[in-house]
Image (spheres, helix red, strand yellow):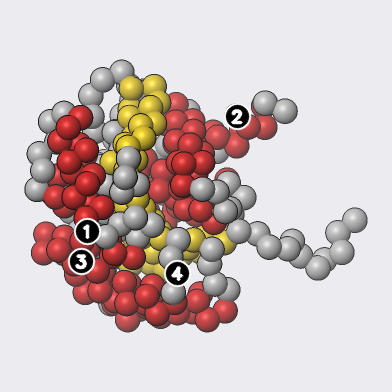
Amino acid sequence: MSTGEGTAALPRALTIAGSDSGGGAGIQADLKTFQELGVYGMSALTAITAQNTTGVQAVYPLQPEEVVQQIRSIGSDIGTDALKTGMLFSSEIIRAVAGEIREQGWTKLVVDPVMIAKGGAALLLEDAVQAMREELFPLAEIVTPNIPEAEVLTGVEIRNEASKREAAKRLAFYGARHVIIKGGHDHGTEAIDLLYDGQGFTELAGRRIETGRTHGTGCTFSAALVSGLAQGLAIDAALKQAKAFIQAAIEDGIRIGSGHGPTNHWAYRRRMALQF
Ligand SMILES: Nc1ncnc2c1ncn2[C@@H]1O[C@H](COP(=O)(O)OP(=O)(O)O)[C@@H](O)[C@H]1O
Ligand SMILES: Cc1ncc(COP(=O)(O)O)c(N)n1
């Protein structure tokens, strides 16, 4: 019988990101992922987007101090074991968020350098790329660009394995302790994510699924990574869990909306349950 005293020491994770009204990406994807992996989820909103599977209809950024206050409220009372950033929109918000993360002394930070939604809408202003590199990357345990984002951040055109590795090295040079260049935008029968830890490379491959339902894959993947870090996993174990989580979520994508449908955040836990 429950004593009503509560569950001790659930891992805690915070997402600092934009809201996706359609529920497939942004903080909604992050919170669903935290919950599915048994992590207590918290959020600090950076922007509201009016969005569905067909695209982004409007973006309403918050004031930098509104973002900072949310983070401060969490830091001054609940705290967090790990955190991620997603859509940050402007250099002003990036600077404010980086300043507050430094203030809180949080180090288990995953930076997902969200730039463009799958439908083509800008989720980061062009002049904010430099602030992202200079302010946020030095604080990051892991940065998780997709291929187009890695190209914008480094100026390296990724055409083959050698240029992908060169881009990863440059991203590490900006201060991130680990770099994962995600392979969703690549071609081939496998989606291969490349991890660089400042010394060597590791590849993690999953079967590429032919589907249009990939809205929120990057958000979901980085939220799963953060969950692993919050649980105390090492980077390679957190990456394996995140890859299995996103693979299941894409394989069991949800048939809703007429455009880029969302992934299924429930799929991984259901598969785990079926194994026992
Ligand atoms: N069609 C796919 N089949 C299997 N895995 C995929 C597919 N698309 C993306 N992934 C995986 O999803 C994760 C997110 O990658 P990606 O889609 O490149 O990010 P983003 O959403 O930032 O563009 C990575 O682990 C990637 O390998
Ligand atoms: C609020 C918000 N944040 C991020 C994304 C990127 O989505 P994806 O993970 O598919 O790149 C999005 N579409 N909306």
Q: CA distance from mark 1 to mark 2?
A: 38 Å
Mark 4 vs mark 1: in front:
1
Q: Is residue 81 above or below residue 240?
A: below
Q: Amino acid at mark 1?
A: Tyr
Q: Earlier in the sequence, mark 3 or mark 4?
A: 4
Question: At 37% across and 75% down in the image, what residue appears?
Answer: 102
Circle 2 crowding by C-alpha within 10 Å: few under 14, some 14–19, many from 20: few
Horizontal side, residue 119 vs residue 126: left or right: right
Q: Amino acid at mark 3?
A: Glu
> What residue is pinned by disc 4?
106
Q: Are marks 2 and 4 in contact (CB under 8 Å)?
A: no
Q: Are marks 3 and 1 in contact (CB under 8 Å)?
A: yes
**Looking at the image, can residue 41 be seen?**
no
Furthest-top residue in view?
189
Mark 3 vs mark 1: in front:
1
Question: At 14% across and 50% down in the image, what residue appears?
Answer: 154
Q: Earlier in the sequence, mark 3 or mark 1?
A: 3
> In which quadrant will I find the N terminus?
bottom right
Q: CA distance from mark 2 to mark 4?
A: 33 Å
Q: Amino acid at mark 4?
A: Trp
Q: Is residue 267 above or below residue 12?
A: above
> What residue is pinned by disc 3?
134
> What residue is pinned by disc 2?
271
Local secondary structure at mark 1: loop
Dot 1 beta carbon under 8 Å from ligand 1: no
Q: CA distance from mark 3 to mark 1?
A: 7 Å
Q: CA distance from mark 3 to mark 2?
A: 40 Å
Residue 177, by quadrant, is bottom left
Mark 1 vs mark 2: in front:
1
Local secondary structure at mark 4: loop
> What residue is pinned by disc 1?
174
